[in-house]
Image: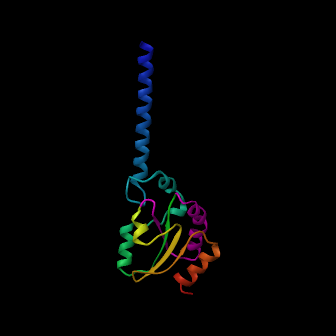
Amino acid sequence: MKKIIIFSSIIVVIFAALALINQYQNKQVSTDNPYGTNELKPETVKQLDDPNYQNIILPEELDEKLNNGEAVTVYFFSPVCSVCNEVSPVLIPKAEEMEVNLYLYNVYEFEQGWSDFNIEGTPAVIHFENGEEIARIVGGQAEETFEQFFKIVVLGE
């Protein structure tokens, strides 16, 4: 009987320790992330340290920029979108190379983006000027297609 009590106590202590460690790790992730929330989905948490996913824009920030009439280029993505995961390593460095300030909007975390911006699928890159959509490019595209989009639509060359 003593062995069962000791064994049960050890198991309870192990589970409690694992729960505390998990809670601590989640707090660490949530205290310093660009999403401004501590309730991130696990797929988003996995991308927090990825250099391709650092220029995150929150819905309120995007609304403010659009209301102010700023020219804004936004990449709407989802961490659970396999095409996004293929496109991001091509698209984001291309934008940086061409000095395009490409904001990233996570529609997986901020689901209102689907309806607010008429997103029918990800990935989608939309360029706005004076609060209005000027052009968009949707789906997996070749690097040259993104380059032409940036050159003609965003940079006006």
Region in magenta: 80-109
Tell me which corner region of the image, top left, top right, bottom left or bottom right, holds residue 12. top left
Q: Is residue 92 left or right of residue 38?
A: right
User: Residue drawn at (44%, 53%), measured in percent from left and top?
Assistant: 41
Q: Position of residue 118 (x, y in %)?
A: 44, 72
Q: Is 138 situated above or below 8?
A: below
Q: Is residue 11 left or right of residue 88?
A: left
Q: Position of residue 76 (x, y in %)?
A: 49, 68
User: Residue drawn at (56%, 63%), measured in percent from left and top?
Assistant: 84
Q: Position of residue 56 (x, y in %)?
A: 45, 65
User: Residue drawn at (42%, 34%), measured in percent from left and top?
Assistant: 17
Pick the residue in front: 46 or 97.
46
Which quarter of the image is occupied by the N terminus? top left
Q: Position of residue 4 (x, y in %)?
A: 44, 17
Q: Is residue 101 left or right of residue 31?
A: right
Pick the residue in front: 36 or 118.
118
Q: Is 130 situated above or below 26?
A: below
Kindly give the residue lying farthest to the top in the view shown. Answer: 1
Residue 107 is a magenta residue? yes
